[in-house]
Image: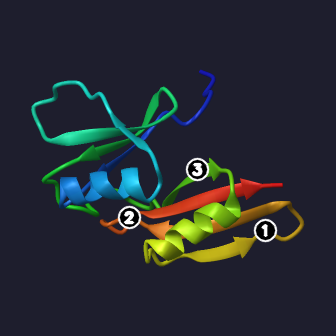
Amino acid sequence: MALRRLDHVTINCADLERSRAFYARVLEMRDGERPAFPFPGAWHYLGERPVVHLVGDAPSGTETGSFDHVAFEADDFAGVRSRLETLAIPFTENSVPGARLRQLFLHDPDGVKIELNFRG
């Protein structure tokens, strides 16, 4: 077996519409097509890939073990930082010692930690 890349993350959310709005408005992900599963949910896309799968009406924080966060590579550190401030989304920032990498950390409405990585 040869793993090639992370395919997606699935997030159980207490309020599907609140989470849909967060991923579309705050992270500017496209809310797109999703198979007709017999439970509520939404898929958010980066380009042509559905990378965040939301499941509605699910208890959040169950059965995730030691899962800590999901990370995305991003562009435009200053622009994203400004948008988070404008939207009043709490965040922290970090510069990785010895690397040309800046990071922003924030949480979605269900408490999932999101790391945004800006290289260069």
Identity, as a three-letter code, of the amino acid under mark 1: Val
Name the amino acid, label 3.
Phe
Rendered-image quadrant of the C terminus: bottom right
x, y (%) of residue 109?
Answer: 31, 66
Query: Disc 2 to disc 1, how far (Cα)?
Result: 23 Å
How many labels sit on residues? 3
The residue located at (20%, 54%) in the rendering is 17
Q: Which residue is mark 2?
A: 108
Sequence-wise, which precedes: disc 2 or disc 1? 1
Confirm or deny contact between disc 3 and disc 2 (CB under 8 A). no
Residue located farthest toward the right when viewing the structure as drawn: 98
Kindly state the secondary structure of the residue where label 1 is placed: loop
Mark 3 or mark 2: whose residue is earlier in sequence: 3
Give me the residue at 27% from left, 29% from top. Answer: 34
Give the color scheme: rainbow, by chain, secondary structure or one colour: rainbow
Question: Element at badge 3?
Answer: strand
In the image, is 29 to the left or to the right of 37? right
Residue 102, x across and y down, in percent: 74, 65
Q: Is residue 95 above or below residue 99?
A: below
Q: Which mark is residue 96?
A: 1
Q: Nearer the viewer, residue 49 or 77?
A: 77
Q: Is residue 107 above or below residue 72?
A: below
Report the residue marked by disc 3: 72
- What residue type is disc 2 on? Asp
Side of 111 relative to 78 (left or right): left
